Image (cartoon, rainbow, N blue to C red):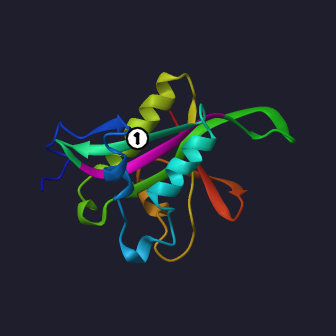
Amino acid sequence: MRDVSTTSPSPRLVPVTADNIDAACAISVRPDQEHLVSPVVKSLAEAYVHPGVAWPRLIVDGDEPVGFVMAFLDIAWNPAQDPADIRSGLWRLNISAGHQGKGYGSFAVRAVTDEIRRRGAARAYVTYHAGQGSPAPFYAALGFRPTGELSGDQPVAALTL
């Protein structure tokens, strides 16, 4: 498979539908990453119970599903502290084990941040697990910077759009 970061115009995000839900649920990360990201089926359940907030998409290259990404859009981050603090960002990113290292993750994050920018936001956010195998360096390479906040036990990082 080619490196999509430099040669492929075909990766795209498509909505998860009745026709591709099985392919979406079949996306699985490497076993050593399973503690870092929830499975797609959980993301789809969260999308179901958070309509209008969750933006789930299957990442496909040609006709082949290679990953899954889900954004959160326009949520009040901590309404008790500041109800005007409305945020959008990356909620979940799962790149299929056999398709990692080919640029699909970077493509998906850029596609999500483009969508967030299109909707008028000035920043995009992400949270992630810290420690062994953390995706922090991946997000830092894409321009996300730690905010010093935590969401639960996960660091929060932001990207100025």
Q: Quadrant of residue 31?
A: bottom left
Q: What percent of the width, then of the height, locates residue 131?
A: 55, 74
Look at mark 1 in the image and give the residue it sits on: 57
- Say if the magenta span includes residue 68: yes
- Say if 76 sits above or below 25 in the image: above
Asked if residue 56 lies left or right of residue 30, the reply is: right
Q: Residues within 10 Å of mark 1 (few under 14, many from 20)?
A: many
Which residue is rendered at x = 51% and y = 62% of the image?
A: 38
**Residue 140 shows up from this direction:** no
- Tell me the chief SS of the magenta region: strand
Q: What percent of the width, then of the height, locates residue 32?
A: 41, 77
- Say if the magenta span includes residue 32: no
Residue lying farthest front? 18
Q: Quadrant of residue 123?
A: top right
**Residue 157 shows up from this direction:** yes
Query: In which quadrant of the rendered image does the N terminus lie?
Result: bottom left
Q: Which residues are magenta?
A: 65-74
Which residue is rendered at x = 87% and y = 41% of the image?
A: 80
Asked if residue 87 lies left or right of residue 161, the reply is: right
Number of numbered discs visible in the structure rendering: 1
Q: What percent of the width, then of the height, locates residue 30?
A: 35, 71
Please state which of residues 15 and 122 is positioned toward the viewer in this rendering: 15
Q: What percent of the width, then of the height, locates residue 107?
A: 32, 44
Which residue is rendered at x = 37% and y = 66% of the image?
A: 29
